[in-house]
Every structure is written in structure tokens, then in C-alpha cells.
Amino acid sequence: MFKKFLLITLGLFSISVSAEGLDTGDTAWMLTSTALVLFMTLPGLALFYAGLVRSKNAVSVLMQCFAIACIASIIWVVYGYSLSFSGDGAFVGDLSAAFLSGIGRDSMSGTIPETVFVMFQMTFAIITPALVVGAFAERMKFSAMCLFSALWLTLVYFPACHMVWGGGLLAQWGVIDFAGGLVVHLTCGVGALVAALVLGKRKGFPGSPMPPHNRSLVVMGAAMLWVGWFGFNAGSAVAASTDAGMAMLVTHISAALGAFTWMALEWIKQGKPTVVGIATGMVAGLATITPAAGTVGPEGALLIGLLAGSVCYYATQAVKGVFGVDDSLDVFPVHGVGGMLGIIMISFVGTEGGFLGSGASGIAEGGPMVQLVIQLKGILVIGLWTAVASWVILKLVGLVTDLRVSEESENEGLDVTEHEERSYDLT
């Protein structure tokens, strides 16, 4: 009997380690993280954005997020993964892994199957252009959005991903971006700003009120983003490790303090806190901690959350109130500014050093200022690359189809004019 039990046990053990280098714990965590990051877009971001727009445009935002998930997934398999993670180019990879060539059931990426890594990174490629939707919500044609998203992924996201995470130029410079301050948040923020400027303001902006039509959807989507972000940041450790544990902890700390700070500022300045404000502050805290989640401790996360809630709050006021830019759902001041802030703060609060880290010399070998210069160079390269490419893409799309819906369509709402559907049928 004992012999039979021993044979069964050994058989199960051999299955768990049959692939050389496979760690089942790491694989299980990365499968979970992948699902969490996709959950951020569908349904998290989709509901968050749908609640923030007017009721006549809610379906259009849901449709855009859903369509982008499909478009990004297809492109990622055909050539996106290859351009991002294959080859040794300085700015972009090659097509050696196009159509996931050479990636099979037994292919490994470190201690996890490469198929899992492909899928995990795919979810990042899905959410990044979906975030840009918030800038041109309520006024871009659906056909233009589809074409813009496909080209934007190709010319902006894949090169940025390769430069930072695929061994390209910025990786060689020593730029630190744990989970996407540059690759995700700066690219979507700058792309959003350019799109808002090229498309122009919504009819009635800024004079006519354009309040969120369903705050319950906003909170529901925001809560899903908060939970899903644990996969986004802690999953970027690509292992069930102590780094993943710390990343999860600091992510939650920054989100909580970012939300609380935004709420407090609203309370002080406007007399009452709002649920949209606290939800937006949470997103700011999450976006800002993202690049630093792998290199910062709890004390640093507190500082980053505090700065995220305050700096992004005032950036939101400035973009619309001072500069008059109709970034509909505040993508640039929350994600763009938050991403840059997090990238900069790594230099001072990274756990390899800095005044809130474990040493006194900063995260870089030569001190905080050395790393700061490297980080600023990363912001400059990715920011300029994204701005120029986004402008060119929008102009090219405009040659193929109208970028913006007609004034009549904007008045009636994109739900009906673009999709022949309504968010709420009360008849």
C-alpha cells in the first residue's frame, strides 16, 4: 500500500516539474495576474468611463473599450509581441516571433510558460489604448477610433515597450519602469492630450455642464480597477515572490492615500467631497505608484500617494480650467502627469537608497541625481516619440475617414448615431 502511494506521489511530482525550469507557483500567480489585468479593462475601465460620460454616449464608450480589446489582441499575436520583445533593435524589435512563431506549449520565459508571458503582456497592450479613449470620448467616430488604435499600438506602444522592457535604448540607459509609468501611463497620457487638441472641444465646453451620468457605474468601475491593479503591478514581478508581495502592498497604500488626498482637497476647496473625486484620486495614486512599485517601500508609497492625490488634482484643474483643453475624462493630468511623477520619484524613494529607502546614496550607484537624469531622459524620449507619432497618426486617419462625428450626431449622442443603440430603454 505504501509503495503504491509513493508511486502516485512521485508521479504527481514529476508532472509538476516536467517542464525544465517551470515553477508552478509562479505560473499560477501569473495566470491570476493576467486575468486581473484584463479585468481592469473589461469591465473595469469600460464601466468607469461609461459612468463618467453623458447617458447618450455610454454605449459608445463601452463599445470602444470592447473593440480595442479585440483589435489589440489580434495585432499582438500577429506582430505586436514580436516587435515588443524580439530582436535587439534600439527602438523596436523585429518580426522573428510574428504570429507567435516558435512559441509552443513547452516554450519557457524564465520560470513560467512563454504563452503565459505573451498573454500577460497582451493585457497591457489592451488597456493602454483603451485609456486614451477618455480623451476623445463623446466626439470621435467609431471607425476613426478603430484605425487610430491599431496604428497607435504599432507606432507608439510597441516601440515604447521594446525600448523600456524589451532590451532597447532606455533599458540600456538604465531607465527604471517597473510596471508602466512610461510604457503605459505616459504614452496614453500624451497620446490623449494630442488627440484632445487635434479633435477640438466638445460642443458646449466649457460653458455647458457635462456631469457624469451614472456615478454608481463610476464607483463600480473604479473598484474593479483598484482590485485589478494588483495583477498589473504585483504581476510585473513575473513571480510569486517577495517583490510581488511588496509591490502589492505599496500599490494599495498609494491608491488609498491618493484617493484620501483628492477627497480632502475637494472637501477643503469645494465644501463637500465627491465620489467621482475620490475615485479619480485612487486612479491617480495607482498610476503614480506603477513605475515605482518594484523599487519602493511603504514609506515611499505614502509619499507617492500624497503627491499623486495633490499634484494630479491640480493638474486636472489646470488642463481644463487654465489651458482650456477638453481632455474629456482627464487622461493626461491623471495618467500622464501621474506616470511622470512616479518615474521621477523612483530616484528619491527607491528601496535601493534615497531618503525614504534603505540607504543614503539613492537608487543609482552614483546617487539620486544620477538616476533622476536617467529617468528624465526616459520621459523626454517616450514623451516626444508619443506626441509626434500620435499627431501623425491622427492626421493620417483623417485622410481616410472623418475623425469627428457631425454636430448633429454629437447633439443626439454617439450611442444612436454610431451604434443604433441606447444605454437605457425606459419604454
Image (cartoon, helix red, strand yellow):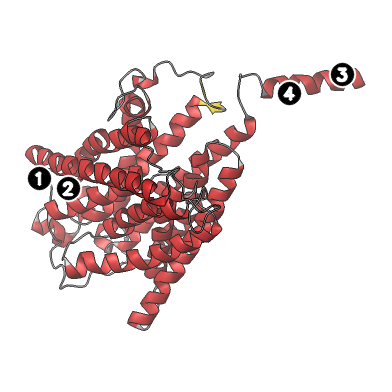
Dot 1: what SS? loop
Q: Comparing marks 4 and 3, which lies closer to the viewer?
A: 4
* Viewer-proximal residue among 135 and 178: 178
Instruction: Mark yes or no: residue 65 visible.
Output: no
**Which of marks 2 and 3 precedes in the sequence?**
3
Q: Residues within 10 Å of mark 1 (few under 14, many from 20)?
A: some
Q: Earlier in the sequence, mark 3 or mark 1?
A: 3
Is 407 displayed left or right of 142 in the figure?
A: left
Which residue is identified by label 2? Answer: 141
Depth check, mark 3 against mark 2: the one in front is 3
- Give the distance between the C-alpha atoms of the residues marked 3 and 1, in whole angstroms: 71 Å
Of the numbered discs in the image, which one, if any, rests on residue 402? 1
Sequence-first tag of 4 and 3:
3
Which of 341 and 278 lies nearest the eye of the viewer?
341
Q: Residues within 10 Å of mark 3 (few under 14, many from 20)?
A: few
Q: Position of residue 341 (x, y in %)?
A: 35, 56
Q: CA distance from mark 2 to mark 4?
A: 55 Å
Amino acid identity at mark 4: Phe
Q: Are marks 2 and 4 in contact (CB under 8 Å)?
A: no
Element under disc 4: helix
Q: Are marks 3 and 1 in contact (CB under 8 Å)?
A: no
Q: Which residue is mark 4?
A: 13
Which residue has dot 3 on it? 4
**Could you say where residue 362 lies in the image, as x and y percent from the top left?**
46, 50
Q: Residue at x 65, y 18 (%)?
A: 18
